[in-house]
Image (cartoon, rainbow, N blue to C red):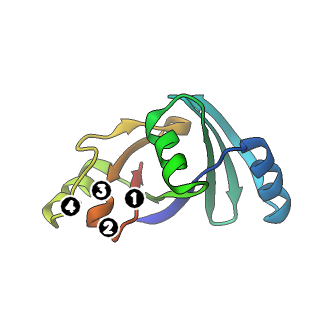
Amino acid sequence: MHYDHAGIVTNDLESLVETYTTLFDATLVHEDDSDGVEAAFLELENGYLELMEPYDQEVLSGFLERNGPGIHHLAIRVDDIEAALEDASEQGVDLIDEQPQPGSMGHRVAFLHPRSTGGVLVQFVE
């Protein structure tokens, strides 16, 4: 398993992309507009930052209302997502997604429940 990206929720995607590309010398490598969320992936040397602005999704909009802008999830890259989910479940980790879901850039993703991961929403990415 390897670090893949941190998902960051914002009210102003365009401004945050500009700030982070300049501040971190990051490269905008992918933009996505699906499931009520506009997203931009910025590449750093050792992974990505996924910047997300919700426009029609209850989960992220609710997160933004409760917590304000900030880190939403931590994504870990796995070679075999089904095996990673099975292993996590066997270790007693509560799964939000028992089966992988389609994600950005053609990846398959699944979330682990924060109550089992120290309060952090963890996403497996294959």
- 73, 77: nearer the viewer: 73
Is residue 92 shown left or right of residue 29? left
Kind of residue sitting beneath label 3: His
Q: Are marks 3 and 1 in contact (CB under 8 Å)?
A: no
**Above-or-below relation of 59 to 69:** above
* Image position of 80 with respect to 2: above or below: above
Q: Earlier in the sequence, mark 1 or mark 4?
A: 4
The residue carrying mark 2 is 117
- Please give the residue where the numbered disc 4 appears in the rendered image: 87
Secondary element at tag 4: helix
- Give percent across and percent down for residue 111: 35, 50
Q: Residues within 10 Å of mark 1 (few under 14, many from 20)?
A: many
> What is the C-alpha distance between the residues marked 1 and 4?
14 Å
Which residue in the protein does label 1 denote? 122
Which three-letter amino acid code belongs to the residue tagged 2?
Thr
Mark 1: which secondary structure? strand
Closer mark to the observer between disc 2 and disc 4: 2
Contact flag, marks 2 and 3 (Cβ < 8 Å):
yes
Q: Quarter-wise, where is residue 99 in the image?
A: top left
